[in-house]
Image: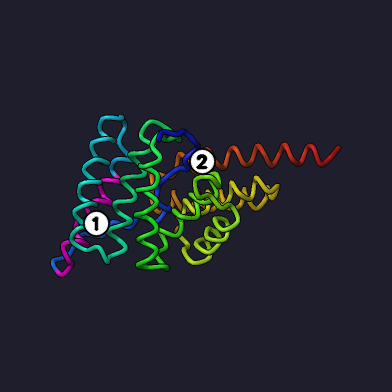
Amino acid sequence: MRMKTLLPVLVLASGLFFLPVPSPAQQPGERLAKQALEECHRGRLAPDRATRLAHFQQGQILGERAVAAEDGNADTHFALFCNLGELLRIDGESFTSLFGLRRMMSELDRALEINPAHIDALSAKGTLLVKLPSLLGGDAEKGEALLEHVVSRAPKAVNARLSLAKVRCEHGRHQEAVTLATDALALAQEHNRPDFIPEARAVLEQLQANAAKANRKAQF
């Protein structure tokens, strides 16, 4: 079955994505998961489609190996989810494979089943819930609550702030939206996140324009 719908920006991961150097004490699955996340991160920074595709495909391979090595580790499933998500949106913010979406969501849900407090996975889940239509499992109210939780618990969560800012804008809470997006851009710049800075700047500019438009309407 093939479908097309809006797919959110998948950082997916969340705006956190810490990439520590694997240590000898780590289990094979943990090392593979970190390598898979590195491929996902590098793919998002790559300047051309072919390079992005190569990184995400390699990340998927590493993620699948990580899951096979440690199925009970939430990080292995999240690493695979990240690369599956980026492969789905390799040609834009849409997808044509319902199977691909279900597989991606299955890995994300498995990560949260293992570790319900996994901040990156919670951020990604919240982002997807507010963007996907209900027919495909979306739930805007639940997604918003998850994003609020992540923002309150993770001071460096850039993507969660951007996703929540868009929700606030849709609800007409424009000043809150601008504040969240401003914080997201500042965090991306402070922590040298080139994969988030352009998006954060673009979102902030759009939300500022929406806020100005709403203010003009309110004056009449």
From the viewer's perspective, is 218 left or right of 127?
right
Mark sitting on residue 201: 2
| Residue at figure coordinates x 54%, y 55% from the top left | 143
Circle nearer the viewer, 2 or 1: 1
Q: Residues within 10 Å of mark 1 (few under 14, many from 20)?
A: many
Q: Among all residues in the image, which is located at the extreme front?
A: 1
Disc 1: which residue: 33
Q: Judge whether residue 40 is colored magenta.
A: yes
| Residue at figure coordinates x 28%, y 43% from the top left | 42
Q: How is the image coloured?
A: rainbow
Per the picture, the main secondary structure of the magenta-coloured stretch is helix
- Which of the 4 quarters of the picture holds residue 73? bottom left
Q: CA distance from mark 2 to mark 1?
A: 30 Å
The region drawn magenta spans 25-41
User: Which amino acid is tagged 1?
Assistant: Ala
The kind of secondary structure element at disc 1 is helix
| Residue 110 position (above or below residue 87) | below
Q: Among all residues in the image, which is located at the extreme right?
A: 220
Task: Tell me residue 96's x, y (percent).
Answer: 41, 33
Mark sitting on residue 195: none
From the viewer's perspective, is 2 left or right of 77?
right
Please identify the quadrant where the C terminus is shown: top right
Please identify the quadrant where the N terminus is shown: top left
| Residue at figure coordinates x 57%, y 56% from the top left | 144
Q: Are marks 2 and 1 in contact (CB under 8 Å)?
A: no
Task: Tell me residue 86's x, y (percent).
Answer: 35, 41
Task: Tell me residue 105's x, y (percent).
Answer: 40, 51
